[in-house]
């Protein structure tokens, strides 16, 4: 695994957000050809939040709205070249990293985040990340988790995780319990993340299922989100959160806006074909 360094580090800068120019958000994600998730969905979300999406492809998928048949990850050199080509041309105001398919992907994005450390990084680890863990060899899993924990999480302004899949990170004998989830969330903060937004957090009364953690003592709960189990929910929330951070919104306000937006989009989901609902992302935030 090699780290890729930019020869133009001294040129890295971020322009203040102009009231007349849409702030740019750099999205790393796969391409879902249906637009249900991935870069197509990210572009719609950014547009709805008044942002310009600039995108870096991590993988092509062969799929419909219900089933992914094939995944073709992009190699790490192409990933790095495309990101730096954009960044050396367009000042971005936030980075949202998702669609990680290998340890090399994580390492490349981590190096880019380090080079642009004045730009907030929102890291999303959801069902796609979990599926890579489930389908990989033990060595590849170890390398991916190591790269994620040691290089990406420490640089994140916010790590957005889906608790429905978080137990895959736990030791094997704890995979089927909820008890490991609080431990993992605290470990994310201990690893250096400034905050962690935990989606679908187990709650006895189901009154608050989204939890924002900042440090050891700060904890904010958001209202119940009944549309769990839809893979694009965290995709939307993390994308919307990155867009809100470009405008200097307080983290709690940005999270609440992002969650409300995703809830509305999912509640108004439509069937475009014969399979699953597609969220209506063109909703007012």
Image (spheres, rainbow, N blue to C red):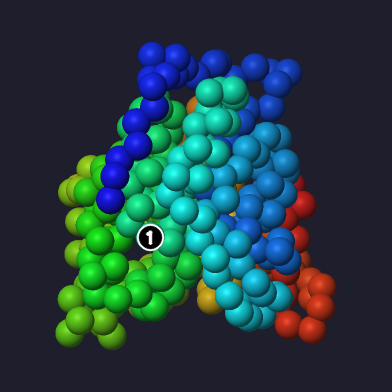
**Which residue is drawn at the image coordinates 77% and 52% (left, top)?**
282
Residue 5 figure quarter: top left
Residue count near mark 1 (Cα–Cα under 10 Å), binned few <14, some 14–19, many ≥20? many
What x and y, as percent, mark residue 196?
A: 35, 51
* Residue 169 or residue 76, whichever sits in front: 76
Q: Is residue 5 above or below residue 79?
A: above
Give the structural element (helix, strand or loop) at label 1: loop
What x and y, as percent, mark residue 285?
A: 68, 46
**Which residue is drawn at the image coordinates 39% and 78% (left, top)?**
135
* Residue 192 or residue 216, whichever sits in front: 192
Q: Is residue 55 above or below residue 22?
A: below
**Which residue is drawn at the image coordinates 67% and 55% (left, top)?**
41
Badge count: 1
**Which residue is drawn at the image coordinates 23% and 66% (left, top)?**
142
What x and y, as percent, mark residue 246?
A: 54, 31
Asked whether, in this view, residue 177 is left or right of residue 32, the answer is left
* Residue 29 or residue 157, whichever sits in front: 29
Residue 102 figure quarter: bottom left
Residue 163 makes an appearance in the image: yes
Residue 247 makes an appearance in the image: no
Which residue position holds label 1? 102
């Amino acid at each position: 695994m090699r780290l890729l360094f930019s020869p133009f580090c001294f040129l890295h800068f971020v322009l203040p957000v102009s009231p007349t120019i849409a702030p740019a958000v750099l999205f790393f994600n796969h391409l879902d050809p249906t637009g249900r998730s991935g870069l197509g969905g990210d572009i719609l979300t950014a547009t709805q939040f008044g942002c310009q999406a600039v995108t870096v492809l991590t993988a092509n998928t062969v799929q419909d709205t219900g089933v992914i048949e094939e995944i073709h990850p992009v190699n790490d050199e192409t990933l790095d070249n495309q990101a730096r080509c954009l960044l050396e041309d367009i000042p971005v105001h936030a980075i949202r990293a998702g669609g990680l398919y290998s340890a090399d992907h994580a390492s490349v994005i981590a190096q880019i985040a380090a080079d642009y450390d004045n730009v907030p990084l929102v890291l999303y680890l959801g069902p796609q990340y979990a599926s890579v863990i489930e389908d990989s060899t033990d060595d590849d899993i170890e390398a991916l988790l190591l790269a994620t924990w040691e290089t990406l999480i420490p640089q994140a302004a916010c790590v957005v995780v889906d608790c429905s899949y978080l137990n895959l990170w736990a030791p094997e004998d704890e995979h089927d319990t909820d008890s490991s989830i609080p431990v993992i969330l605290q470990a994310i903060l201990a690893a250096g993340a400034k905050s962690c937004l935990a989606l679908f957090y187990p709650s006895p009364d189901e009154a608050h299922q989204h939890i924002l953690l900042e440090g050891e003592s700060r904890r904010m709960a958001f209202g119940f989100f009944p549309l769990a189990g839809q893979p694009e929910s965290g995709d939307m929330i993390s994308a919307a959160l990155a867009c809100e951070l470009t405008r200097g919104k307080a983290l709690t306000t940005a999270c609440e806006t992002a969650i409300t937006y995703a809830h509305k989009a999912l509640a108004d989901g439509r069937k475009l074909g014969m399979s699953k609902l597609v969220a209506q992302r063109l909703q007012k935030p």
